[in-house]
Amino acid sequence: MESQPIEKHGKRTRTVRAAHVADAFRQEPAGFSRASFGYLADSEVEFLKARVEDVLADYGVVIMHPEAYQKFIAAGAKPGTDANRIRMPRELIREAMAATPKSVRLGGKAARFNIDLPRADRGFIMRTGTGGHGYVNPRDASYRKTDLTAVNEMAAVANTLDEVGFIAHPFVHGVPEVTADIHSFGRMVSRTQKHCWMQPYQWENVEYLMKIAAIAAGGEDALRANPITSCITCSFTPLEFKFMDTHVIIQAGKYGVPLHACSLPSSGGTAPLSVAAMAIMAAAEIVGMTVMAHILSPGTPVIATPLMFTLDMRTGSALQSCVESMQAANMSVQLMKRGWGMVAHTYGSGSDTPDVDVQGMAERAMLTQTVALAGADILGGVGQLECATVFSPVQAVLDNEIGAMMRRFIRKPSLELEALNWDAMMQIRAGGHFLDSAHTIATCRDQLQRKVFAREGRGEYEKSGRRTAFDTARDAALAAIAAAPDEGVLSEEQNREIAALTAHADVRIVEAYAGAVAVI
């Protein structure tokens, strides 16, 4: 059942949107298969798996965390050719990849927002963009640095987007830089019932972030039982694991939080200028982090997260939506899912243009299709522009529409005789029609209806003052912001605890950082 048109003001908006949001978590009908497209044959997946093992076993990775380094050695790893490098035995790699859970629960604060991956219908869920330092005001398209007010608005809009299963906190300005992640995560987690993606910026902040998540979940035990957050841990390409990200793996195990093992290779920069080599680099780093999680935090769910970039050889700019990055994302998703059976997460939206424009819509539509057909479980990047550095609420609404179309697009149409309306087709009279066919009446509501994309004819278009999908998306974003409750979704006590913890971090971490800088 499709939801009703958006109303701009009052409680009705939230009621309509609550029904809307439920659609994102609805499984597609049983009996439908999924369309797919990928560059790799089964033999090629096996070839690339072997190359990944060669990288890890014969050359190795750099481990900057002393405890993790020693635990790798105790597990049978051998020192590499330079300081802090270890080489992983193939048997250890295979043991870890076999033991790591192949499914994950991304919990919401309310049960209806829980996400279990992989989905039973082999579909995907989307998430908002993260990391962007810039924000495009939906009121007048003006640009500013992202601040806590922008976080409120991002949450308000994302709460109404039925394809968005979870929300990432951005980098914010206007607060101490070294605790910006704590401020932003605390604000975002208090403004949504949906799952939140955590991205720490330095190792001292990790436990503060985990404690904020525990407060929002109702306690540490509640967080372990239903993790309302998941945390990114990143490699430092090429083939290096920083102290902070290793610390994230340890803390995720302590709090029962799923991990997004993220590799961000840049072809021509931190990875060879080759689509296949970039896929190998990303997979080697993701598998390396998965082995580390197996050693340091056994049983922790790990989501393979290859985020692929390519350097523009003319300008040196990083591109996420060029053809080469799309191809690498498709191959990486295939490799992680078919090679090791992992839940896969990559950019499924986003563009390299700095504006909500025709170029951006073309780029993100191609990217969404490329990774959805590869079988990605999570499509990231909703709302992001300028190679993941800017967030636009209007673009997020448009991306939600693309996501709905793509979720339906990958559902292979049925060839059953009943679905073909075969009997009626074989009896149709000359000049007849199927408007009053029982089959048409029974199935017409299954048609995917647009929410913001325009379909009216020329006359209505001219009468509207030539309104476009952008105008409708902007109205939807502004309506969501206007309807969002000022108090957020947590209790007053929870908000006080989060505020106190954030203030404590500002004192301890900011002062410690200032002291360290003074010593230097």
Image (tube, helix red, strand yellow):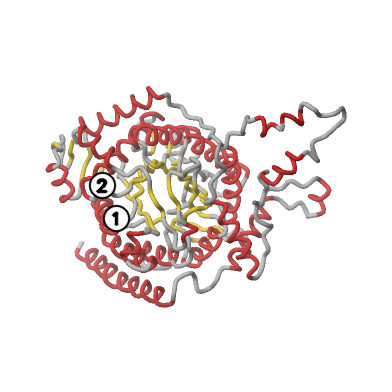
Q: Which residue is mark 1?
A: 252
Q: Secondary structure at mark 1?
A: helix
Residue 519: quarter of image: bottom left
Q: Residue placed at 60% from the left, 50% from the top?
A: 398
Residue 337: quarter of image: top left
Task: Report the front residue among 74 and 301.
Answer: 301
| 489 sits left or right of 20 in the view | left
| 60 sits left or right of 480 in the view | left
Q: Which residue is mark 2?
A: 293
Q: Residue placed at 33% from the left, 24% from the top?
A: 47
Disc 1 packing (10 Å; few <14; some 14–19; many ≥20): many
Image coordinates of residue 469 in percent, x first then y, are: 68, 50
Image coordinates of residue 102 in percent, x first then y, are: 35, 42
Q: Secondary structure at mark 2?
A: helix
Would residue 433 be seen by someone viewing this image from the given angle?
A: yes
Identity of the residue furthest to the right in this view: 431
Identity of the amino acid at label 1? Ala
| 437 sits left or right of 512 in the view | right
